[in-house]
Image (cartoon, grey):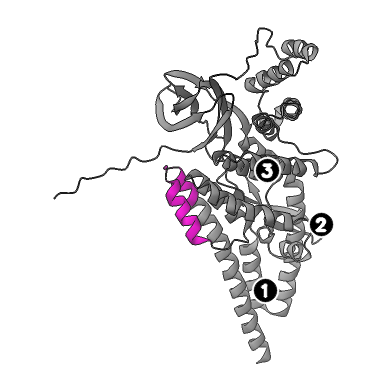
């Protein structure tokens, strides 16, 4: 009788655990797919409504990151920074090893670990907060974000994990603030990092950055380095121009497409420790990078192509490759623990052993979490324009060379100053049809 009661209790407890685990996994997967599905049909507003409604837990870093990006996409820059600041603070609080966090990942799966984002995601968090501040005209606040990103990039071990776009973007903000010495340092670093990460990102040094570097060298009177760098950068015929008088500069930053989404894969592998095959699950990027539509500016029928300055798709895949040895080590160790608990339960009672087997199989899930609302690429253009209000169109061009969408904006160009326009494009926004009311 006691044995039957004990078996019944075990089965009930395991069933509850199984239900909780499966519900948690399904909730995250469904929300991520739902957000992306709406973005892929141009409905960022619907994606935002779903994200705000479905997840009210402000301590969830990933939920805050996605809410922040969706608010940006719908033009709520202040609201975006409000929730991104929440994510930032929680990420900082998660530094260090949590004993309960580690124990949970060893008993259940990696998805129970607190999410603090990959390094590239943490850096881009500061980049997008800076962009929000730029859209609100708060240059000094944008400067704070790039300085925080600098601290973040430099604190990761003896070899700093630096992002070339963030260095370049920092230089642009420094220059907008009139801090040319700081801007030159940032441009030099950006050039070096683009070269160092060429294989990982697949990007050459942007032509814009080459010209910015030469322009500042000339402006600061570093003529020898200027002459040497012209030849080194392959711009021997370049002639620097200074933005002044009745002209200002517009800097356009376009977030194009969507970052890759992780899926789950699983294999059976032999464990010498238990002398048996065990099942391990791990995250993968199953799909190849999407070929994005090109983008260009159209200002008074003059076309200026945007240049790719950040390949987030490559950053995501490289980050997973770097983490994979540790992921597999944890997965195999976890599989061994589960095998042993399963065997122990089976020795106590056949039903308990069966339920433990089912629970272990159900909870052996890969951690497929990532900041899914990030773009696939970041593209930029810089253009000098006459002072005053200027109509600007970011045109999206398909492989056949046809314009498939336009992002329209009016920008205010100030004498000798730099203005910023930051936008997202994933898919054309559906045109709303209004029917006139009858009297």
Q: What stretch is highlighted in magenta?
A: 35-55
Q: Position of residue 396 (x, y in %)?
A: 45, 29
Q: Are marks 2 and 1 in contact (CB under 8 Å)?
A: no
Q: Do the residues labelled 2 and 3 touch (CB within 8 Å)?
A: no
User: Which of the 4 quarters of the picture holds residue 389?
Assistant: top left
Position of residue 358 in the picture relative to residue 34 (left or right): right
Residue 367 seen in the current view:
no
Per the image, label 1 sits on a secondary structure element best described as helix
Residue 81's place in the image compared with 97, above or below, is: above
Q: How crowded is mark 2: few (under 14 residues within 10 Å), some or many (20 or more)?
A: few
Q: Where is residue 36 in the image (x, y as percent from the top left)?
A: 49, 47
Sequence order check, earlier mark of 2 and 3: 3
Q: Nearer the viewer, residue 87 or 364?
A: 87
Does residue 365 belong to the magenta stretch?
A: no
* Residue pointed to by mark 2: 272
Residue 399 seen in the current view:
yes
User: Which of the 4 quarters of the picture holds residue 101?
Assistant: bottom right
* Residue pointed to by mark 3: 145
Which disc number belongs to residue 353? 1
Position of residue 420 in the picture relative to residue 42 (left or right): right
Q: Where is residue 287 in the image (x, y as percent from the top left)?
A: 56, 40
Q: How crowded is mark 3: few (under 14 residues within 10 Å), some or many (20 or more)?
A: many
């Amino acid at each position: 009788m006691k044995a039957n009661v004990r078996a019944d209790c075990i089965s009930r407890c395991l069933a509850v655990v199984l239900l909780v685990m499966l519900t948690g996994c399904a909730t995250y997967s469904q929300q991520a797919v739902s957000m992306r599905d709406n973005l892929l049909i141009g409905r960022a507003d619907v994606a935002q409504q779903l994200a705000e409604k479905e997840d009210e837990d402000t301590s969830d870093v990933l939920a805050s990151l996605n809410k922040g990006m969706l608010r940006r996409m719908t033009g709520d820059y202040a609201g975006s920074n409000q929730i991104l600041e929440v994510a930032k603070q929680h990420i900082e609080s998660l530094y260090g090893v949590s004993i309960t966090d580690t124990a949970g990942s060893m008993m259940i799966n990696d998805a129970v670990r607190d999410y603090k984002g990959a390094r590239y995601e943490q850096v881009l968090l500061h980049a997008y907060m800076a962009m929000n501040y730029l859209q609100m005209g708060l240059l000094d606040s944008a400067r704070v974000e790039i300085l925080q990103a600098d601290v973040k990039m430099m604190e990761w071990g003896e070899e700093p994990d630096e992002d070339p776009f963030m260095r370049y973007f920092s230089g642009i903000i420094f220059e907008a603030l009139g801090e040319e010495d700081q801007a030159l340092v940032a441009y030099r670093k950006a050039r070096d990092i683009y070269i160092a990460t060429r294989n990982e990102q697949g990007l050459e040094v942007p032509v814009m950055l080459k010209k910015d570097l030469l322009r500042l060298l000339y402006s600061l009177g570093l003529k020898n380095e200027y002459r040497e760098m012209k030849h080194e950068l392959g711009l021997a015929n370049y002639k620097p121009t200074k933005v002044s008088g009745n002209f200002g500069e517009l800097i356009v930053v376009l977030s194009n497409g969507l970052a890759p989404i992780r899926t789950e894969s699983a294999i059976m592998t032999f464990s010498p420790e238990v002398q048996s095959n065990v099942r391990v699950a791990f995250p993968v990027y199953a799909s190849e990078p999407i070929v994005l539509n090109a983008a260009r500016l159209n200002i008074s029928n003059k076309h200026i192509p945007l240049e790719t300055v950040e390949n987030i798709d490559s950053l995501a895949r490289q980050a997973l490759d770097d983490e994979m040895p540790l992921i597999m080590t944890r997965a195999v160790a976890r599989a061994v623990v589960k095998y042993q608990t399963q065997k122990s339960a089976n020795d106590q009672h056949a039903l308990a052993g069966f339920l433990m087997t089912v629970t272990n199989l159900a909870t052996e899930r890969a951690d497929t979490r990532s900041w899914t609302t990030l773009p696939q690429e970041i593209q930029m253009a810089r253009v000098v324009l006459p002072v005053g209000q200027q109509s600007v169109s970011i045109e999206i061009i398909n492989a056949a060379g046809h314009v498939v969408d336009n992002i329209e904006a009016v920008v205010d160009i100030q004498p000798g100053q730099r203005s910023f326009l930051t936008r997202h494009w994933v898919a054309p926004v559906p045109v709303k049809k209004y029917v006139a009311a009858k009297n």
